[in-house]
Amino acid sequence: MLSALLIIAASLFFTGLINRTKSWTSGRKGPGVLQPLRDVYRLFRKGSVYPATAGVLFRVAPTIYLASLLMALLVVPFGQEKGVLSFNGDFIFFAYVLALGRFLTIVAALDTGSSFEGMGASREALYGMLAEPAFFVLMGSLALLTGHTSFHEIFNALHLGSWISYALATLATFVLVMIAMIENSRMPVDDPKTHLELTMVHEVMILDHSGFDLGLILTAGYLKFALFGALVVNLFIGMVPTGYAIPLFFLIQTGMAITIGGIESFMARFRMSHNPQFITVLTSVALLVFFGVLLLSGRFL
Amino acid sequence: MIPVNLFLMVAGFVLVLLPFLKGKMQQAGWLVGVVLMAGLSAVPAWRALTGTPVEWLLPGNVVTGEIPLRLDGLSAWFILIIDLVFLSGAFYGVHYLHFYHADRNTLTLHYLSFLLLQGALLLLCVVQNSLVFMVLWEVMTISAFVAVIFEHEKWITVKAGINFLIQSHVSLLLLMVGFLYGAIQTGSYDFAALSSLPGGKGAATALMFLFIAGFGIKAGFVPFHTWLPHAHPAAPAHISGIMSGVIIKIGIFGILRMLLLLPMDYTTIGYMLLLLSLVSGVYGVMLAIVQHNLKKLLAYHSIENIGIIGLGIAVGTIGLGSGHSFLVTLGFAGALLHTLNHALFKSLLFYTAGNVYQATHTLHIEHLGGVMKKMPLTALLFLVAAIAICGIPPFNGFVSEFLVYTGLYSWMREASLVALVVIIFTIMGLVLIGGLALLCFTKAFGIVFLGSARKETPHAVGEVSARQLAPLWILALLILLIGTFPQWFTQALAEPLALFSSTMTAGLSVIPGHSSSFSSGMVAPAAGVGEPLTTVTGIVSPVAVAAWGIIGISLLLWAIRSLVLRSSRQETSPTWSCGYVAPNPKLQYTAGSFARSYTKLFRGVLTFSRKEKGVEAIFPVGGHYESHASDKVEQWVIDKPVNGFQWLMSRFLFLQNGKLQVYILYGILFIAAVILLPVLAGWFSALLVFLKQL
């Protein structure tokens, strides 16, 4: 339960912090850290405009999208505290429940009959497909390292000791952060601030959503950041008692938000055709972690 | 003896009676026949599944010898799946066939072939005499062929049917060689004799390779799959559902049965199956994405799912070889459950595709669109099946894939270096399959059912009747039920799993010391041989809770949303198109463009043929663009050898010159050869004797 509450708490400021960092690096005054919340609150009270071609599915999809994220949130542990649900193979469930949300957002985008949204949907499906192996290989390496197959047990048994384990943790963090960026359609892959429909991925899929539904989608986006942030945090706090872990949690989440803001400020988006290449590289990095674990566990003779 | 005789009598009676009935009576007779056969087989099967396996001994005749019929857990599981799919297929098919009611002869033939197919499939699960098994296999093939070529006035249907017939006979040939070898070596046609095959592990393993190829053709493993994407679209919808739901599964059944019988080298076979399944899974879905025909897309997806089932079997088989009982349990449980799951969602998908075909008279994805608004229930059913087939919770596909994943991840702890590398690539493959399936089904569902119609249909499109949808709702309900109460179904797997566990104990007595290698005991708590059931149920029950969680949270959010939206204003306006004010359906994204970034990425594996005429000049008069994906494996395995053979044979065309005199000459030459050859041989041997004496 604690982890769910903490993730929700972190999601309150995560996106605001990214925006704040971006405005700071570009010399703007920028909106307050809580501005995203105000946006969502405003959207929740607004009426909605639905495209004429769209049917029921378009209206249902945002709800299930957010529900899938909330469900994924329930299996993520916090240090020594279990998630609300913890079972063997819960990380498989985690990835597949996110796929449920992805399935419905893609389908909802196609429901509008717009070419732009179809384009975004096609890219989302492709990038999601390419990014997933990285996550599974990474979790597989951690499962092999610790001998466990649930988030809570894996993170609890994870201790960093030798130099190689630090290297592996760095790589794992890199992979997780990058998966978070792809899942959230952020900078190296997608630019949330672009103004051209042709170059968007996630933003273009939700072009026609409005009002309450758009609010749900934005909320889901905020949660997603904090969710992957929590996974990164978990890599480091398995052995730390809960009392120290909570400040550490917020520290790492803040650090991650600022890093993402930094990446977004100083990096350009890749060309669309280079994205698959980049995402596949993540899987290779995850494989590197895997072979590192093989080395560490002495399976190479 | 009674159930089997009763079953044969009922089947025979219905088959004889049916041609003499007419119209509605014939239809009713057919349905009664299907229900009776299903009922008569389901009762003993259910009893076998709950712990009382039966064995009957039919006297047979001089040629076949005694015919043992053994109904154990494995047979029972498959019999129940067959019954379920055939019942839903028949009750759906009645309405689907309604449009062909004028064509009485074809219908009669179709009813008969349907019943024969059902009978043959059911009997194949229990007959354990290899000679009778092969006869039944042939009956199944021919009746399936007749069922497939229902629309025989289309040449493409007949072509697909003949392709199926020929490839099925290649399958039969391989099985025949295998069974006859077994019969000669053991001196009995009884399956049970195979377990004491002389020649040790080597012979049994070699025989298993033969059986995997033979049964693999039926199951549709790549590269034996090429008949499948042709036959499925050609058949009427209910037959496609049955083919994909159960006919290809009989190949899986055959492989599982042989795994239980032959004393083979499980590790070798396991790794080979793993490779075969992984290739099938990934290749099947990769080809599925680029198909333009909805049923062909679904057919390629069957290959993918056979791959997933095969992965489960492979994991279990490797467990048999290495003596890890949790691998055996998880692998085979995943495979068997996925067999049921695939039968459910794939037949549902084919039936709903049939509904779309009935309403719009096309299955070309690029011509469809916006069907959901006209056929909301069909669309909902298709959506449920599509989410399920992608392995996404809270539906059934996730449960079986979860079991295979859990098997693979738990295997890691015990595996050697080579095995670990194999595991990680298998996991990657399985994840890739899941991701590609999502791409494929968002495309299929999104383009066919959503947006607006891309082509005008000549008449109004409307929902099919409630009675036609009824069997589909039952399938959808089962899909949801397995997703939310998987424990019930894994408990039913206890008997079949016990069979595999006992195979392992039998094998373990040969290699002692492996039984207790499972020590760390965190996951899959050291499943003892006697208790495979608790493990699987223990593993899937939290998944059930999570599935309920998704449903609960979604409903809660939906309730909040409805509450909030009650007071807010809602409007409709045209879809955003950058300010363009006259959008039309042709501006929508097409299936081809949806898959384009994917096809660009994987162009090494895919081959396309394109026909295109660009839009030129200032006042263009029209252009067109068409692309068709072709199957590389089919080109290399089927087309090229067949073409080569045809070329070779065409060298001898001069023999067939149409002159009667020459043909008579051939006849005389043949007769002369027949008479002279023994004489010549006699002379030759005499010459040899003479030479020796020199």
Image: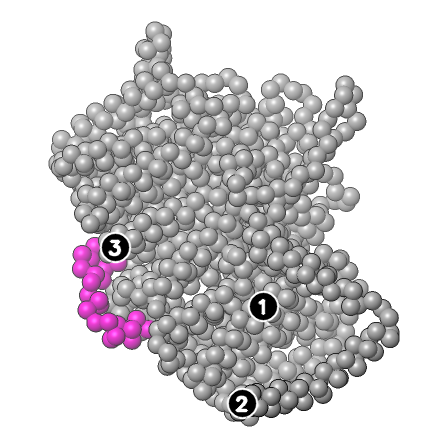
Query: In terms of depth relative to the viewer, which is nearer, B149 or B424?
Result: B424
Circle 3 chain: B
Mark 2 on the same chain as mark 1? yes
Which amino acid, mark 3?
Answer: Ser
Q: Residue at x 41, y 77 (%)?
A: B72
| Image mark 1: chain | B
Dividing the picture into quadrants, the one containing residue B682 is: bottom right
Quadrant location of the C terminus of chain B in the rendered image: bottom right
**Looking at the image, is A209 positioned above or below residue B222?**
above
Check disc 3 and report the residue beneath it: B416
Residue numbers of the magenta segment? B503-526
Give the residue type at disc 1: Val
Residue A77: image x %, image y %? 24, 40
Q: Nearer the viewer, mark 3 or mark 2?
A: 2
| Prevailing SS of the magenta stretch | loop
Q: Is residue B87 visible?
A: no
